[in-house]
Amino acid sequence: MPRNFPTGAALPESTDSVSALTVMASVRSTRGAEAAACPPSDDEAGCELALVRRAQTGDEEAFAALVNRHRRAVYRAVYAALGSADEADDVAQEAFVAAFQSLGGFRGDAAFRTWLVAIAWRKALDRRRSVARWLRRTVSRDLANDLRPNRCTVWRRRDLRRRTR
């Protein structure tokens, strides 16, 4: 059942195709991701920072736990930028891959979620720009072909001018 986004638009549920397993094909079992997650406690920020530090050292299960924690926030941000559930799933996937590749650059100045959503937002804007560029090229070619008169059109115009004189 769709929920409302703060903009008032209905937000469909993620298709759950964005998961730790699709981001990291090398993670063999989901039990490892569950074991990597911190138990519920008062110190969520410390737990998350510990997961990030473990992921930075190459612990794929820790990164899978981070993906599981933040996949809905990433999906919602990307969906808000794109407006398409299918595109949002694809871009969220790309965002998690990009985050994994640049995990060493995370300094901890901001919350991990903030850093991750910023990456996702930039990926979504990049996708939106690339789609807009593609549309401009495609539509402008089609319009140019439609506006270019063919022989029949030229003859009809000449005939119409002769008749109206």
Image (tube, grey):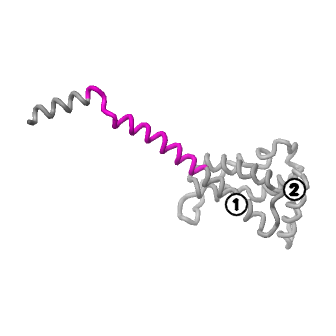
Local secondary structure at mark 1 = helix
**Amino acid under disc 2:** Ala
Tell me whether the residue at label 2 lies in contact with that at label 1, contact meaning CB atoms closer than 8 angstroms. no
Q: Is residue 159 left or right of residue 70?
A: left
- Picture quarter containing residue 140? top left
Neighbourhood count class around disc 2 (C-alpha, 10 Å): few under 14, some 14–19, many 20 upward: many
Q: Which mark identifies residue 154? A: none
Separation of residues labelled 2 and 1 (CA atoms):
17 Å
Q: Nearer the viewer, residue 86 or 126?
A: 126
Q: Position of residue 155 (x, y in %)?
A: 22, 27
Looking at the image, which residue is at 53% across and 43% down? 134
The 10 Å Cα crowd at callout 1, few under 14, some 14 to 19, many 20 or more, is: many
- Tell me if 165 is positioned left or right of 114 in this view: left
Q: Three-letter amino acid code at disc 1? A: Val
Range covered by the magenta-colored residues = 127-152
Tell me where residue 16 appears, x and y as whole percent. 70, 49
Expressed as whole percent of the image width and height from the top left, the position of residue 36 reads: 89, 56
Residue 133 in sight: yes
Q: Which residue is mark 1?
A: 117
Q: Nearer the viewer, residue 68 or 131?
A: 131
Mark nearer the N terminus (2 vs 1): 2
Magenta stretch contains residue 111: no
Q: Residue tagged by mark 2?
A: 55
- The residue lying at 30 percent from left, 32 percent from top is 149
SS for tag 2? helix
Q: Left or right: 58 with respect to 10?
A: right
Q: Main secondary structure of the magenta part?
A: helix
Vertical order, 55 against 135 (above or below): below
